């Protein structure tokens, strides 16, 4: 026996209605904090629904961080922010993988996490000047003899 297409249509309609109601509630929750930025809010929600990444650009004080922090709070998600600087490298965000083959031991691999995967990070400056290497990163490489 074939399934009844009208039954599936009703179920899909009910799911779409529930999704629309959830999106309206999300929009209303964000609009309680972010006022007058409906188009930007819709765009960020669409980006989230599409499973993509977004880059919010603008001068300081427009509420970019507040918008994303509010959305994360409304959806019970974690919030992480990356301050882009002129010297930011992809490895700073996603991390690196390395393969080493010491002479006396078996080969091994290691993974280093990027800044975005850490739970706490110090704020970075966007001054255009290169950052000084931290003590930790300067000790990572063996000294030349």
Image (cartoon, helix red, strand yellow):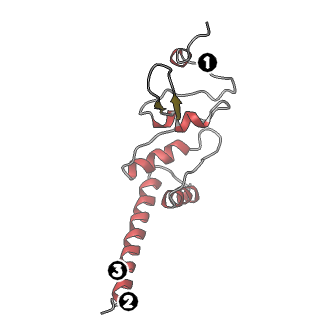
Structural distance between the alpha carbons of marks 2 and 1 = 65 Å
Which residue lies under the disc numbered 1? Answer: 132
Q: Residue 67 location in percent, x, y?
A: 50, 48
Q: What residue is at 69 percent from the left and 23 percent from the top?
A: 129
Q: What residue is at 50 percent from the left and 20 percent from the top?
A: 103
Q: Residue 106 location in percent, x, y?
A: 44, 26
Q: Is residue 47 above or below residue 87?
A: below
How would you rate the neighbour count of disc 1 (Cα within 10 Å): few for under 14, some for 14-19, many for 20 or more? few
Q: Is residue 109 above or below residue 31?
A: above
Task: Report the number of discs.
Answer: 3
Extreme residue in the front direction: 104
Which residue lies under the disc numbered 2? Answer: 5
Specify whether residue 86 is in view: yes
How would you rate the neighbour count of disc 2 (Cα within 10 Å): few for under 14, some for 14-19, many for 20 or more? few
Specify whether residue 82 is in view: no
Structural distance between the alpha carbons of marks 2 and 3 = 10 Å
Q: What residue is at 59 percent from the left and 39 percent from the top?
A: 61
Earlier sequence position, callout 3 versus callout 1: 3
The quarter of the rendered structure image containing the C terminus is top right
């Amino acid at each position: 026996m074939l399934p009844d297409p009208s039954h599936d249509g009703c179920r899909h309609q009910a799911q779409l209605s529930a999704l629309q109601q959830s999106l309206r509630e999300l929009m209303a929750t964000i609009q309680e904090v972010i006022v007058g930025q409906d188009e930007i809010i819709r765009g960020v929600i669409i980006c989230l629904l599409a499973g993509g990444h977004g880059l919010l650009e603008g001068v300081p004080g427009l509420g970019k961080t507040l918008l994303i922090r509010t959305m994360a709070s409304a959806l019970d998600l974690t919030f992480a922010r990356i301050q882009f600087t002129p010297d930011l490298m992809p490895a700073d965000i996603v991390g690196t993988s390395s393969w080493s083959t010491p002479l006396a031991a078996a080969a091994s691999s290691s993974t280093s996490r990027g800044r975005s995967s850490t739970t706490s990070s110090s704020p970075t400056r966007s001054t255009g000047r290169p950052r000084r290497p931290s003590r930790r990163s300067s000790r990572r490489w063996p000294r030349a003899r």
